Amino acid sequence: MYNKTEIDNIDIRLAPPADEPDRQYYFMAKCREWTQKFREQHGYSPRACVVNMGCQMNARDSEKLRGILETGGYELSSSEESEFVLYNTCTVRENANLKVYGRLGYLGSLKKKKPQMKIALCGCMMQEPEVVEKIKKSFPFVDLVFGTHNIFKFAELLTTMLESDRMVIDIWKDTDQIVEDLPADRTYSFKSGVNIMFGCNNFCSYCIVPYVRGRERSRKPDDIIQEIERLVADGVKEVMLLGQNVNSYGKNLDEPITFAQLLRRVEQIDGLERIRFMTSHPKDLSDDLIEVMKHSDRICRHLHLPLQSGSSRILKKMNRKYTKEQYVALAQKLRREIPDLSLTTDIIVGFPGETEEDFEETLDVVRKVRYDSAFTFIYSRRTGTPAAVMEDQVPEEVVKERFSRLLTLVQDISREMSARVQGQTLPVLVESVNGQDEHLVTGRLGNNLLVHFPGTEELIGQTVNVYLKECKGFYYIGERANDEERSEVKNGTVNTDDAEICGNERAI
Ligand code: 5AD
Ligand code: SF4
């Protein structure tokens, strides 16, 4: 990674280097020259706003995009009235796309008032050719469009955009390249996502991800370890290892390694307190992984294990490669081996051909597994996926009615499961001052449940023991306890996402 002086020493009159990441640092230096000129002309720094619209992977990408902008001399801002606005889009469900179009209309009206404003789009949605066509036609004021495979080239694309008065579009179909050592601007000082792999090879029949994120590519373990060591040296206490299917990590490396083996290495990093990961595909979850989790003090007691449907017939049509019985047996094994584990899931309602009986099977799995929390989604037809052309798409009213029954069940169980640790004293990593009551701080248990307790700003980023006085459904009200008063429970956690509902992401 370059430091500031090294960037200032790059000679931008020379031709750009061919190798990465040197090439991108060259363009960041070029961007610095542009932002410096802007400052001289206007008397203030140009601001840049990156809007993250998707999952944790997308959020991590946004941190990297912000890191590049900051290194390029922009002042980071959360205002969409900034000189540069970048939407990092998602396309897993159609409503994500519709939201982008709506917000672009608004950005267009801002740009009319401030023509020097630059607007850029990137992320999964841009990998869909019809989307790019629509943007060209309906939103000609957009200045830059790029996709998921060439995100590492952002600095280069940004300088091209600054020098051009036409829409710059660069979308790659796929890549096998992974560029290391680019800067990132972390949202939290004390926790960070860490990509361990990119893409997905599973082709679940409803899912657009393999088409927009490409084939599975794992980062080398040494690169991952080095990144985490640097993060820890910079104050990070918790990492979330990210991949579409972390259980198949390492299979395609020159020297193959399993996810469980990687976890064993990550666990040995001094100073790292908590390790989380997502997402796990049930078909690939190994006994070795269960063993590593079971004996670890640092791996949070949480597993996100997407079910999608409880009907073996639908699971087959979804191309999930497990049956209802196999899934339930795996969940029961996990509950048996790691009793304090928090199990969460994703469920889709209304997949083509889903009958009332199929849906009842889903409810049955929810009752059997008793999820700590679940993200429930209404099936969304994604063009280009096999499910989009399947017959028997389920009528909207039927889906809505099922969705609401599922939600009620999931929430009832989640409430009961959340109350499991009431009366215990557990470590809480403090994240912020409470938004509604400044006398309280908010932190997370290892199992990802939120806890609000009296405290001040200085506690942010610290892990403190908290007595869990009262469970309020999906969060706790607690009281700080002495360091010695910790109950004998290891770290645990749950996940966050952009789901329509979630059992445990409730504010106070
Ligand atoms: N419709 C609804 N939900 C979907 N997901 C993925 N594709 C679709 C779709 N077409 C959900 C899955 C996945 C989560 C990230 O998003 O449940 O696990
Ligand atoms: Fe989509 Fe299935 Fe891959 Fe998850 S595992 S990203 S649901 S194709």
Image (cartoon, rainbow, N blue to C red):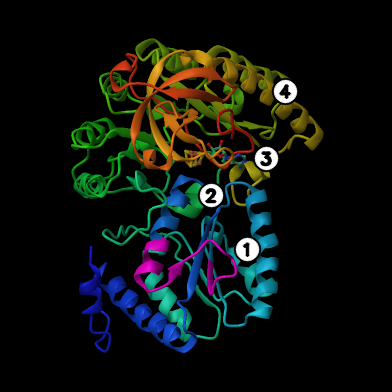
Closest to the camera, between mark 3 and mark 2, is 2
Amino acid type at mark 4: Arg
Q: Quadrant of residue 225?
A: top left
Secondary structure category for the residue under label 4: helix
Residue 405, numbered circle:
4
Please report whichever mark, 3 or 1, sits nearer to the chain's N-terminal start: 1
Amino acid type at mark 3: Met
The residue that label 2 is drawn on is 54
Q: Kindly tell me whether residue 351 is visible in this rendering.
A: yes
Q: Nearer the viewer, residue 356 or 9?
A: 9
Q: Label 2 neighbourhood size at 10 Å, few (<14), some (14-19), many (20+)?
A: many
- On the rendered image, what quadrant is the C terminus found in? top right
Closest to the camera, between mark 1 and mark 4, is 4
Q: Label 1 neighbourhood size at 10 Å, few (<14), some (14-19), many (20+)?
A: few
Closest to the camera, between mark 3 and mark 4, is 4
* Mark pair 3, 2: CA separation: 27 Å
